[in-house]
Image: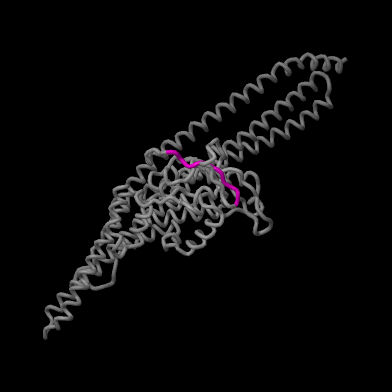
Amino acid sequence: MEGAAQKSGAFSALDETQFYESNDRNSESTMTSYGGPLGASEASVTPRAAPASDLTTSTSGRVEGTKPSGGSSQSAALLEITVSDPVKQGDGVQAYVSYRVSTKTSLPQYRFPQFSVIRRFSDFIWLHDRLAEKNYGTIIPPLPEKNAMEKFRFSADFIEQRRRALDVFINRVAAHQMLRHSSDLQLFLEANEDVWAVETSRTATETTSMLKKKPRDFLNMFKSVQSSVTNVVLGKEAPEVVKDEEYESLKQYVLALEGHLAEARKQSERLVRRHKELATALGDFGEAVIHLGSCEGGRLGAAFTELGNRSDVLSTKSEKQAADLTLSFEQPLREYVRMVHSIKHVMADRAQALQSHQSLLAELEAKKQKLARVRSAQPAAPATKLAEVEREIQEGERKADVAKEKYNLIVERMRGEMARFQEEKTRDLGQVMRDFAASQARLANDTADVWRTLLPVIDAAKPAVATNAGAAAS
C-alpha cells in the first residue's frame, strides 16, 4: 500500500490532480506536526510529573503536558484512543451528546504523548468523510447509524451503544497502517475548539460526488461499466465491453456476506428480546408466587417464597445477559453489516475508475478514426486541422493513461484491504462466537445451580403437605 501511495505521487501534476494529491497528503513523507494553534497545548492533556520547563499551558488554561522525548518507528508506534464521558449538551432540538476523546501516542508528529479533546457525533462524521474522500480503494471503518428515534436519542442505552461504536471506529482507524498517519486524524485528535471550528467549516463544502453516492448505487455503476461506454460510432463494430472478472467475483461474495450477516444480526436481536422477555416473565412469576407463599404460610408457603426469590435472581441474570448480548454479540454483528457497506463504497470507487478509463478509451478511439478521416479527406485537409486532431489524440492518450493508473492503484490497494478485512473478520467474529458460547454456558450453569438449591426447600415442604392433607380428611 505504501508503494501504491508513492506511485501515485508521480502523477500529481496530471488531470487527476485532486486524486493523487490527496494520496500524497496522507503519505508519511508529507505528514506535518501541528505546532502553534493546532498543538496539543490547546487540548486537554493528562498531567504527569515533568520538569517545569517541559510544561506548556494553553491560553485557555485547559492544557498541561510534556512533549515526547524521542520516538519509535512509526509502523510500531503507539496510537491508542479512548472515547468516554458522554455528556448531553443543550436542550430541545439543539441538544447533542459530546464525548471526550483521549489519546496516547508515541508518533513523533504529535506534540504530546497524552492529551484529550471534546468531540460530538458530527465531528466523527467529518473525519469519516474526509478519510473516504482522500483514500480511494481503502475500506474506511464504519460509523454507527446517524439517525435515531427522538425518544431514544438520549437514553442511557443508546448513548452507551453509540459511545462503544465510536470507540471501535476511531481505534480501527488508528490501527490502519495508512489511515493512522492521516493529517485529518491528527487534526481531529489534537485541534482545540477554535481551530477545529475553523477547519471543519472550511472543509464542509469539499465533498466529492462519490461521498454522496449510496452503497446500493455500486450495482448500477457496475452494470454501466459492462454496458456500452459511449454512443459514438466506431465503424461497423460495437465498442468492446471490458468485464472485470475479479470485481464480479468480489461483488457476489459481498452481496452474499451482507445477506448472511444481516440475517444473523436479525436473529441476534430476537435472541436479545427473548432474554428480555424471559427476565420480565421470571420477575412477574417470582412476585406472584411470593404473594402466594405469604397467603399459604408454613413450609409450603416458605417453598413458594423461595421459588419466588430464585425466580427474581434468574430474572436479574437474564436481564444482564440481554444487556451483555446486545453489546458483545448483536452490536459486533451490526458493525460488520456496516463494514460491508464500506466495502461497497470502495467497490464503487473501483467501478467508477474502470468506467472512466473505458470511456476515455472509447473517446480516444473515436479521435483516431477522426484522424483517419481527416487524412483521407479529398481535397486534403489543412495541415492545421491535422495537427489539431493529433494534439487531441495525444491529450486523450495522456488522460487514458492517468485513468488507468488510478484504476490500477485502486485495484492494488483494494486487494490488500480485502485481505486485511478477511483476517480481521475471522479474528473478530471468531471471538464474538466464542464469547457468545461461553456466556450461554455460564447462564445455563447459573440457572441450574439456582434451581438446584431450591430442591431441598421443596423436599422439606412435602411432609407438611401430607399432614395438612390428613387433617383435612379427618
Question: Is residue 222 visible to the viewer in this orientation of the structure?
Answer: no
Q: Main secondary structure of the magenta part?
A: loop
Q: Quarter of the image containing the C terminus?
A: top right
Q: Position of residue 284 (x, y in %)?
A: 73, 35
Side (left or right) of 142 relative to 327:
left
* Residue drawn at (51%, 32%) of the image: 435
Q: Given the current orientation, which residue lies at the most extreme front position?
A: 53
Looking at the image, is 357 positioned above or below residue 448? Answer: below
Q: Given the current orientation, which residue lies at the most extreme bottom position?
A: 379
Which of the pair 415/236 is nearer the observer?
415
Q: Is residue 62 magenta?
A: yes
Q: Given the current orientation, which residue lies at the most extreme right position?
A: 474
For the image, the number of numbered tags is 0
- In which image quadrant can residue 25 be found? bottom left
Which of the pair 401/115 is nearer the observer?
115
- In which image quadrant can residue 150 be found? bottom right
Q: Position of residue 197 (x, y in %)?
A: 54, 58
Looking at the image, is 387 positioned above or below residue 343? Answer: below
* Residue drawn at (45%, 63%) of the image: 206
Q: Position of residue 232 (x, y in %)?
A: 26, 73
- In which image quadrant can residue 308 be found? top right
Q: Which residues are magenta?
A: 60-69
Which of the pair 465/264 is nearer the observer?
264
Looking at the image, is 95 positioned above or below residue 106? Answer: below
Q: Is residue 129 magenta?
A: no
Question: Is residue 9 visible to the viewer in this orientation of the structure?
Answer: yes
Q: Position of residue 425 (x, y in %)?
A: 42, 40
Which of the pair 304/418 is nearer the observer?
418
Side (left or right) of 305 relative to 323:
right
* Residue drawn at (42%, 42%) of the image: 107
Q: How is the image coloured?
A: one colour
Side (left or right) of 53 relative to 107:
right
